[in-house]
Amino acid sequence: MAWGQGARRPILGLLLRAQQQAAQGYSCSAFQGHLLGAYVPPNGMFLRRFSSEVSASEQMNLIKQLRERTSAPIKDVKASLVSCNWDIDAAQKDLRKRGVVLAAKKSSRTAAEGLLAIAQDDKRAAIIELNCETDFVARNDVFQYLASSLAKMALSAQGAGELFLPFGPEYLENMSINLDHPKLSGETTVQSAVTEVAAMVGENVKLRRGFMLSTTAHGVVSSYMHTCPQPGLGRIAGLITLEAEDSNSLLDPLNRVGSSIAMHIVAAKPLFLSKELVSAAAVENEREILRTQAESSGKSQMAMDKMVEGRLRKYFEEVVLMEQKYVVNDSTNIKTVLNDLSKEVGSKVTIGNFIRMEVGEGIERAETSDGSEAMARAA
């Protein structure tokens, strides 16, 4: 009996110690493991319990909340919550830190998808291209919000007298932007905002380029966006400025026809405004190609010359806006459309500038070795 009581004292002591340590936040299971012969670290410290303090339903709720806040992948959301002991605010900060690192690693990947965004008023318009890797991300509301915000910022940054201004990402990236979105808010730089969105969506996101258009004369800026998920966003855009000589002319007809010609620009892909603006080198290069084709016909020199000139006229109809057949009514051309508009408003109407942009044009994609050339031209 004396031996049995003496043997119980060490066991009772260990159990008492286990209860005291558990009250201080340590896991009893570690002490049970000790009694069963499990490994205990040399420093005598036991593991704090994390997930056992938060129920499975609470964990799922926290994951859902943080996912809604940040749009980060579920795997990253859970990892940050676990590392931050299920503190959602700390995990959100941790995600942002992780995101900057991940975004930097992904910056070398090809980003040829995305959206164009337009912001405009009566006299000015700005268009930007924001790229990502997949069209799935292009449908993300945070990505779309950023694209729209960047276009509005570019419009507000447009200086007086800048009738046509192409710009790269460096034009905007160091400017401050104030964002107001449930998942993206506060004042930051454009470059930081792009990096943060890249971290959220898990892809390479880049502000690639932009254009600004304006008219200082009595005229309008008109636009058309194709494949449009919401107003001001799309994959292909056409913009044009129409100007009337008489400052008393009504602008409503110019807006109506301008929108129609902007749609024509998207469909017909003009490269030049008029024949006079086609470079002599481009004309001579095309003439040489047509001459080589004509020589294979075996006809007389006079007949071949006529063939070359006829095909050259066809070339102008394909690439020169003023010579193109109007897509709305192919029995006429753009030059005639402008003449009819001039008669309607009682003043000569001219085209100032035009742009055609398409997402990803000129970017070499992984699956193909030849990217299409950019189709933006101005007078």
Image (cartoon, rainbow, N blue to C red):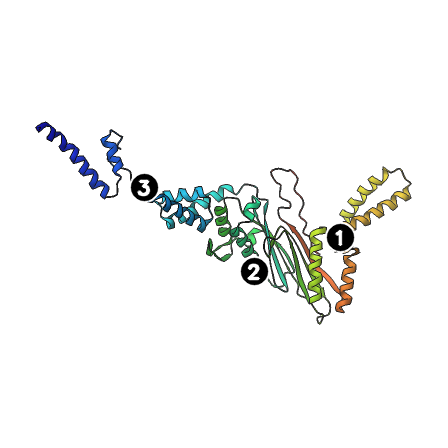
Element type where label 3 sits in the image: helix
Could you tell me the amino acid type at mark 1? Val
Q: Which mark is residue 121?
A: none
Residue contact at pointers 1 and 3, CB within 8 angstroms:
no
Could you tell me the amino acid type at mark 2? Ala
Q: Which mark is residue 320?
A: 1
Label 3 and label 2: CA atoms lie apart by: 53 Å
Q: Position of residue 334 (x, y in %)?
A: 76, 57
Location of the N terminus (image quadrant): top left
Kindly report which numbered mark, 3 or 2, lies closer to the viewer in this rendering: 3
Q: Position of residue 216 (x, y in %)?
A: 66, 65
N-terminal of the pair, mark 3 or mark 2, is 3
For the residue pair 283 and 8, the one nearer the viewer reads as: 8
Element type where label 1 sits in the image: loop
Label 1 and label 3: CA atoms lie apart by: 71 Å
Local crowd at mark 2 within 10 Å, few (<14), some, or many (≥20)?
Answer: some
Residue sitting at x 76%, y 67%: 344
Residue contact at pointers 3 and 2, CB within 8 angstroms:
no
Q: Which residue is mark 3?
A: 52
Picture quadrant where residue 52 is located: top left
Residue sitting at x 18%, y 38%: 16
Q: Which residue is mark 2?
A: 157
Q: Position of residue 229 (x, y in %)?
A: 59, 53
For the residue pair 45 and 274, the one nearer the viewer reads as: 45
Location of the C terminus (image quadrant): bottom right
